[in-house]
Image: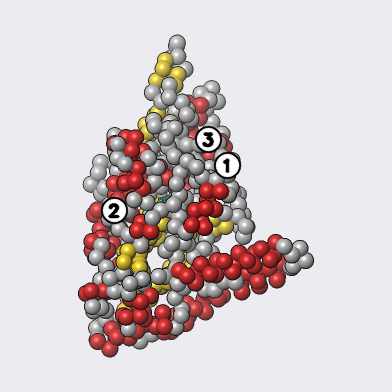
Amino acid sequence: MQGNILKSHGRDHSSHLLITFDTETPEHRRKAREFLSGLVESNLITTALQQWEEAKAYRDVQATIHGNGAITDKDVAALLLSASSVFVGVMVSAEGYRALKLDTRYMPDDPSFLAGAKARVDVLQDPPVEDWEDNFTVPLHALVIVADDVADRLESVVTQLKELLQGFCLRVGEETGTAMRLKADGEEDPSAPVREHFGFVDGVSQPLFYARDIDNARTRRGGIDRYDPSAPLDQVLVKDPGGKDTGYGSYFVYRKLEQNVEGFRDDEMALAKKIAEFAHPKTPTPTPEDIALAGAYMVGRFQDGTPVVERGVAGLGSLPNNFTFDADPDGVRCPFQAHVRKSNPRGDKQRQFGQPLTQERTVRIVRRAISYGKVTLQPGPDDKVGLLFLCAQSSIADQFEFIQNQWANNRNFLREHSGLDPVIGQIQQDQPDDDTLAGHWPKLYGSRNELDFSTNPPSVVGHTFALRLLGPWVTMKGGEYFFVPSLSALRAYG
Ligand code: HEM
């Protein structure tokens, strides 16, 4: 099995080679298939086992460093470098399987995968394919991910791969990603958590598969006792039809998502102004706390990762994943449409529709995204920034597509007029752009009954107000669905 499925490869720099093979002649097709199998034969692919062993070696080196006060920064960097290597992974699209004329018994059978992302535009309310970037409008056959913490070492593998691809390739598009390790004020700091361009710490909540990771989550950093972070292997792995007995793979969704940071900030401010009007009507100018709360209502977490359902001010930090929405059945602490509540409702469906929690939990995805564009929280008007969104699952229709289509884009989930997901919700092209798209937001954090002081005597009013944000501020620029084949299948392709 390849790496980066059960656990993130964790490298901060990433290059994605989007490959369109020249499949006109049998000779070219043979070379393309040999390229894929050659990645395994030449040990370029990082296996799940290798990733596991490297992670252990890395931890050992870190332990040595901690126990040795005399060690210099330069030695630390060299030691850590020696304990890791470049990560390489490969995946193939359904169009790729067909174009390479791989035996049909090798073809994975997920219906959305077989259709390909271009055929799912209408289902997901994505922009039309002609509006996508060139890297994605072409037929994409394979994606190779090369990742490392050391940009130079990564570059030499990318160059090597591009040379290998010469002669039987029509096009190799490239997207590059960087994990933005930034402090809250946007200053770069290698020890800071990873943030996305709207400024929020990202990659906090992930389904965990390895016993070691699950134990760590349960016992360290305050522990987890209210939310089960573990997931069964079949949430992400499927038997690879082209592989041997132990050959497993996974479906990957790839989407280039451009973020309009200025637009997001404007919406955050519009929401903050309303929050201020309700919280302190006599001085209705939004305070920094109101603005932080507005962002937290949109995302479901404060910028530092604190879940807004837990408290109305930041400060818990990015680590806690120990929360559900049990104590907030009315959405007065975390609005129903907040990005994390839409994309992982943590029991809302049981409360609202009586659906077993086990069923809701099968919808979870494993995120492997990385930011692209300038490393900054304040991009200029011409800076194109966003997320190279990648997620793994065992069923694209039941996991990624379900979240995007049934939850994020659905203004009536969890309840009538809950509103679109303010981060990733996409509007139907033919939908009226009117107030029915407004979301409902808490008037006063955590309060169910609010007094309206504008009337005399003050009257009791509802606990939420409706506000139509101007987003979406995330625009899909293209993507594809891939399958990450097992090593035994890849060998057989040659
Ligand atoms: C969580 C941002 C796209 C699904 C998060 C978090 C942030 C974030 C800040 C909270 C940190 C965390 O729990 O890791 C973004 C941005 C996106 C984006 C800026 C686009 C540019 C997507 C897409 C999906 C998605 C396309 C799936 C359709 C999730 C899920 C979680 C999450 C499942 C974890 C929820 C939980 O378990 O609590 N995202 N996201 N995100 N996002 Fe996104």
Report the quarter where the C terminus lies. bottom left
Q: Which residue is mark 3?
A: 311
Looking at the picture, how far across and down is residue 327, in whole percent? 44, 32
Distance between mark 1 and mark 2 Cα atoms = 33 Å
Relative image position of residue 156 (x, y in whole percent): 52, 79
- Circles 1 and 3: CB distance less than 8 Å? yes
Under tag 3, what secondary structure? loop
Q: Which mark is residue 229?
A: none
The residue that label 1 is drawn on is 316
Give the residue number, with chain letter if any, for mark 2: 398
Secondary structure of residue under mark 1:
loop
Task: Determine crowd level at label 1: few under 14, some 14-19, many 20+ residues with C-alpha closer than 10 A.
Answer: some
Q: Amino acid at mark 3?
A: Arg
Q: If you read the primary sequence from the N terminus, does the residue marked by circle 1 or circle 3 appear first?
A: 3
Tell me the quadrant of the picture where the N terminus can be found.
Answer: bottom left
Which residue corresponds to the image point at 57% horizontal and 54% vertical from the top-left? 193
User: At x 70% / y 71%, what residue is drawn?
Assistant: 75
Q: Is residue 366 visible?
A: yes
